[in-house]
Amino acid sequence: MKEYCCHGNRLTLTLGVNVQQIATVERQVFDFLGYMWAPIIGNFLQIIFIIVGFFGALQYRPKIVIVYAVWSLLWIGWNIFVICFYFEVGLLKRDSPILNIDTGNRSWWFDNGIGCQTPNKTQLDTGLDYVEGCLLQYYYVEIIHAAIQCLFSLLGFCVGCYVVYVFSEEDDSFDFIGGFDTFSSAFQSPAKSSHVQLQPVYVATGAR
């Protein structure tokens, strides 16, 4: 039963990281189109650690799965920052150069959102933070992307921790039944008989 449970959680983790990989690659494509270099670097690292977690679960390597789990926490922190950035929490502003690394680029969704009107040069020069006619403003699209990554990473972290726990339990409870029996029987001293049989002793005496 325990082995079946471990196998099921390994399967859940491998399927989860595959879905997470697809979502990250999709996000990476649109970040490349918008030349958002900080998210591009973050997505690239995320793709690498997803591959690490996949092979860790596939090859029963708990230490590798731990690396993936730790990175998942860092990735959650980064995406929470992105959400705060687009919501303009505190001192954060959407027009600050943090995500584009001072290149002046904007999210690809800013000009290409669903139903959006293409902003003209005058609107861009005035620092317009939205485009009229959009079904969903670009910053909400970015927030949704970040929230999905947080959800996947949180699930991956929880399942990864449980898989590591099960791996550790299996190592500690290795079944030695029958292992020492054969070994001990090979070196067991022969059993002593409880009955001692007395034999007559004849002493040869010289003739007189």
Image (cartoon, rainbow, N blue to C red):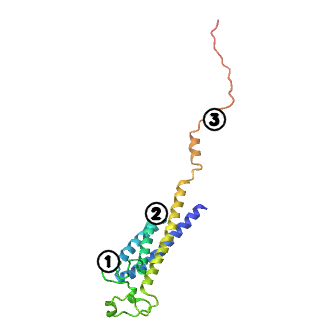
Q: Tell me the quarter of the picture where residue 206 sits.
A: top right
Q: Tell me the quarter of the picture where residue 83 sits.
A: bottom left
Q: Nearer the viewer, mark 3 or mark 2?
A: 2
Residue 166 at x, y = what percent? 54, 60
Total label count?
A: 3
Residue 189 at x, y = what percent? 59, 36
User: At numbered mark 3, what does the secondary structure look like: helix, strand or loop?
Assistant: loop
Looking at the image, which is closer to me, 95 or 90?
Answer: 90
Question: In percent of the image, x 40 and y 89: which residue is there?
Answer: 130
Relative to residue 169, is residue 111 depicted above or below? below
Marks 3 and 2, how far apart at CA = 52 Å
Marks 1 and 3, how far apart at CA = 83 Å
Image quadrant where one finds the N terminus:
bottom right
Specify which label sits upstream in the sequence, 1 or 2. Answer: 2
Residue 38 at x, y = what percent? 35, 76
Q: Amino acid at mark 2?
A: Ile
Q: Amino acid at mark 3?
A: Ala
User: At numbered mark 1, what does the secondary structure look like: helix, strand or loop?
Assistant: loop
Relative to residue 125, is residue 67 depicted above or below? above
Q: Tell me the quarter of the picture where residue 123 sits.
A: bottom left
Marks 1 and 2, how far apart at CA = 31 Å
Specify which label sits upstream in the sequence, 1 or 3. Answer: 1
Per the rendering, the mark at residue 66 is: 2
Specify which label sits upstream in the sequence, 3 or 2. Answer: 2
Q: Which residue is mark 1?
A: 101
Residue 135 at x, y = what percent? 46, 90
Q: Residue furthest front?
A: 90
Is there a contact, CB below 8 Å, between mark 1 and mark 3? no
Q: Amino acid at mark 1?
A: Ile
Q: Which residue is mark 3?
A: 191
